[in-house]
Amino acid sequence: MNTKPAALTVTGVGVRYRDITALVDASLTLEAGCVCGLVGMNGSGKSTLFKAIMGVVRPDTGTISIFGGAPADARKAGTVSYVPQSETVDWSFPISVRDVVMMGRYGKQNWMRSPRRCDRSAVENAIDRVDLTELADRQIGQLSGGQRKRAFVARAIAQEASLLLLDEPFAGVDKRTEATITRLLRELTAAGASVLVSTHDLHALPDLCDEAVLLQQRVLMHGRPEEVLKPENLALAFGVDPLSRTTSRTSEVS
């Protein structure tokens, strides 16, 4: 019997922004070594769920635990890493790709944040894994959108977190970045990490994820991707079958 605590446990979480309800009684459990896809239309509460886990917003109801402990402790220990949908970055600031990735090591450094050999090694390894070694010294604002996304994924890898949260990492990126991130998520979970990733690319979901969560303010379904992607289940969240709609549009264009 597996006695290890779940990587992430969300129980009855509700979040309101004044008169707007973002989440209602949302519950899910993510086990270790699993890639879980978070699926839902815009406004379904995906980003709010990530922010609640990271302490950016405080739930009005419910509880969240990470590896059986308080999320604040996990964040302090660097056990959880977050790649938001859009980084709040001054792209003109004179900071290199290597500097951005080194930020993932801050929680492991002393108060002076003096990089040690192990920090530099972790950073160089992370940069190499996202195929940005040749651009490591380039100013972050000079990268393409896909390259920027890979740089922030490298920051999460350098942190060596056991739970990774990625909010729409494939939005607006090139095929190379999409393939690189997909490969990395699989490598990380094979090594024991857990990943919760939101995505609109439903066609890629079965190859990317071990399981999927259908979200519409509350968790409507949590299961294998092929089960969640059944038209009758998608209709619960989208009102229509987005896979069929995409296919129809493709046929019309061709």
Image (cartoon, helix red, strand yellow):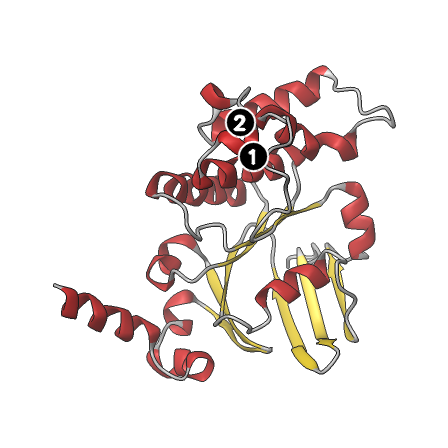
Tell me: 163 left or right of 176. Answer: right
User: Whole-percent x and y of residue 188?
Assistant: 53, 41
Image quadrant in which you'd find residue 1: bottom right
Type of amino acid under label 2: Ile
Front residue (pair 23, 208) = 23
* Quarter of the picture holding the C terminus: bottom left
Q: Is residue 3 left or right of residue 143?
A: right
**Left or right placement of residue 59 versus residue 49 in this view:** right
Residue furthest to the top in view is 117
- Residue that appears at 65% across and 66% down: 48
- The disc, 1 or 2, on the residue closer to the chain's N-terminal end is 2
Residue 70, horizontal then vertical, whole percent:
81, 57
Residue 70 drawn above or below residue 80: below
**Relative depth, front residue between 84 and 3:** 84
Cα distance in 3D space between marks 1 and 2 = 6 Å
Q: Nearer the viewer, residue 157 or 178?
A: 178
The x and y percentages for residue 178 are 39, 45
Q: Residue at x 60, y 25 (%)?
A: 96
Residue type at the position of mark 1: Ala
The residue that label 1 is drawn on is 154
The relative height of residue 35 versus residue 59 in the rendered view (above or below) is: above
Q: Position of residue 181 (x, y in %)?
A: 45, 42
Q: Is residue 79 above or below residue 108?
A: below
Q: Residue furthest left?
A: 254
Residue sitting at x 69%, y 20%: 118
**Classed neighbour count for the residue bearing mark 2: other residues with Cα under 10 Å, few (<14), some (14–19), many (≥20):** many
- In the rendered image, the residue lying farthest to the front is 92
Whether residue 128 is situated above or below residue 52 in the rendered picture: above
Are the residues flagged by discs 1 and 2 in contact, CB closer than 8 Å? yes
Q: Which label sits on residue 127?
A: 2
Residue 153: image quadrant is top right
The residue sitting at the right extreme is: 111
